[in-house]
Image: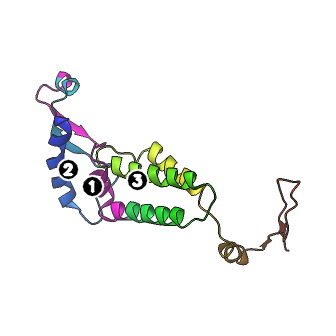
Amino acid sequence: VSSRWMLLDPMMKKIQEHPILGNGFGSSVTFISDDPRVRELHPDGQWTTYSMEWGWLELWLKMGILGPMAFLWIFILLVHRLLSTQTDQHWIRSGLVSGLVFLFATHVFSPYLNHPIGLGFLLFVLLFLPETQEELPKIFARSKIRIPQQIPVQTSAFSLRVEE
């Protein structure tokens, strides 16, 4: 835990170098660690890492302030869309919103949003967002794909016709 706190000051100094656009995804921070594994390799405790434990600060360091703002915007959009959904299965909506809240809160101390676990969960949530009847015509109006008016109940798949 002390190594995480010792990383905080060097991270803030590195963020101040490029606070708006960030330092890039390959940027690293050098700090003094109390971790016994680090002390075995480097007795002075000096350690350079490109993977930081402060998730939101790591996004800021690498992407600039626009990175965390974009992730917060995604959070707001997903939660709003899930909460505005009318469904008989409220437990799914509650579970997904709770998962998003915990994911974004946990990201304070552990980098989950820039990890396949967090990004995978964001993609998983997208599968449960409703497609309203108003949105589908707008999407397909620009393409030449035509949606069938009625889908037979006995078949699970339907074919799309493309106009030539």
Query: Identity of the amino acid at label 2?
Result: Met
Span of residues in magenta: 40-69
Nearer the observer, 21 or 110: 110
User: Is residue 163 depicted above or below 70 in this figure?
Assistant: below
Residue 38 drawn at (x, y percent): 20, 27
Q: Are marks 2 and 1 in contact (CB under 8 Å)?
A: yes
Mark 3 or mark 2: name the one nearer the start of the chain: 2
- Residue at 18% across / 60% down in the picture? 16
- 78 sits left or right of 86 in the view: left
Nearer the observer, 118 or 23: 118
- Residue at label 3? 101
Mark 1 or mark 3: name the one nearer the start of the chain: 1
Mark 2 or mark 1: name the one nearer the start of the chain: 2
**Disc 1/disc 3 C-alpha distance (Å):** 22 Å
Please tell me whether mark 2 sits on a helix, a strand or a loop.
Answer: helix
**Disc 3/disc 2 C-alpha distance (Å):** 25 Å
Report which quarter residue 115 is drawn in. Answer: top left
- Residue at label 2? 11
- Residue at 40% across / 49% down in the picture? 103
Report which quarter residue 90 is drawn in. Answer: bottom right
Q: Residues within 10 Å of mark 2 (few under 14, many from 20)?
A: many
User: Is residue 156 depicted above or below 74 in this figure?
Assistant: above
- 156 sits left or right of 111 in the view: right
- Residue at label 1? 61
User: Is residue 76 depicted above or below 105 in this figure?
Assistant: below
